[in-house]
Amino acid sequence: MNSKKEFLEDVNVGRGIAIIFVIVAHYITIIGKDFVNVYPKGLYNAELFLYSFIFTCDMPFLMFIAGLIVHHQRTKLDDLRSYLNFVKKKIDRIMIPYFTYSFIMVPFKYMLREYAFRRPSGSFHDYLLSSIKIILLYPLENPMIVLWFLYTIFIVFALFPLVLKVSKRLGHPITLALVICSSFLPLPDIMNLKNMTAYMVYFYIGYLFAFNRKENIKLLHSKRYLLISSMILLNTIYFVWFKDLYRSNLELAVRLVVIIVSIFSMFEICATIAEKKPIGFSQFSLVGRYSYDVYLNGHLTQIALRVLFINILPLDLITLSFILILGPIYIPIPISYFILRRHELTSRLFLGSHLKHH
């Protein structure tokens, strides 16, 4: 797997699987709020376990992939000029869509507040003012909840050159140890700093993994069954005994181990899928190529479908489940292909990219 094309295949598969997991996690949240009393208990408990796995490991996996890509692209971060250029590109790619969707969501959520999980209260003026503060400083409370990840990964991108500066003096092993230690610090909620340091760990691991990527993938393949069984066992242990101890030092340490093992296991699976191209490969790759589009617009699609088919035109649970999972995955793709990616303004505002010709 030397070529850039082969490299992008396993990354696209990884993105595709991770974004599908995001949609499934939001579906489980909807089921938990609206159908918990009629849902088969055993199946719902299994979905709660899946939700715990996704909530714990999925976003760290995307951070790992992001770090791997930064190394693959040979991004130059040696001086102030290259750093500022790097940050400018990330503002265009990440923060412009962040602010676009955030401020679109404020009036949208207020108008549909009777259907919202986190219902706005008070006047629209008060809600707008509080939302501006939240959008700027508290991404975990963003009116469009999925946007917290964009904000957080931007901060990680902006601070990662500092990590590389330290690594040139101390070496990667010591620097990684310091970054891991920083993830245990009791940092404030502002700018999601309390979680950002942990995400920096997984980003950095992805960056380091890319140094000897071929050899590392071979090593993962050789430990495939050990990794997968360990991932299942560790996530089960965490789900049963540790998740309720959230943010204690013991829980943070256990979660760190669980996530790292899960990241390597998930990437091994993605690399295997990219190499062997089984049934489903093309769909994972397709969703991966549109992962940003699906992540941003899939959530809005799921909200619209939830309001329509739960609150206005109720459907049976089985039909609703298919719609709430498949709709948010596949509806945003043609919207992006035929509309958002066709016009410079929409491409910049909603996807953070320049116009791409098809």
Image (cartoon, rainbow, N blue to C red):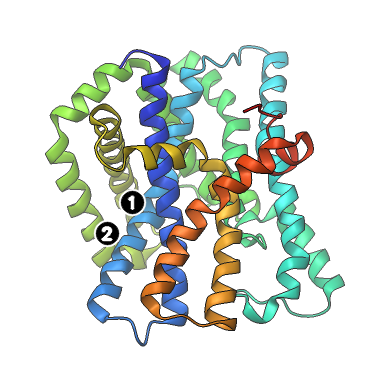
- Front in this rendered view, residue 171 or 100: 100
Residue 106 seen in render: yes
Which residue is labeled 2 in the image? 238
- Front in this rendered view, residue 238 or 47: 47
Q: Looking at the image, do the residues carrying marks 2 and 1 touch, with CB atoms under 8 Å apart?
A: yes
Check the image and name the residue furthest to the right. Answer: 125
Specify the amino acid type for callout 2: Tyr
Which residue is labeled 1 in the image? 255
Gap in angstroms between the C-alphas marked 2 and 1: 7 Å
Q: Is residue 129 left or right of residue 152?
A: right
197 w.r.t. 316: above or below: above
Location of the N terminus by quadrant is: top left
Residue 151 screen position, x and y as percent: 63, 45
Specify the amino acid type for callout 1: Arg
282 w.r.t. 233: above or below: above
Location of the C terminus by quadrant is: top right
- Front in this rendered view, residue 169 or 277: 277
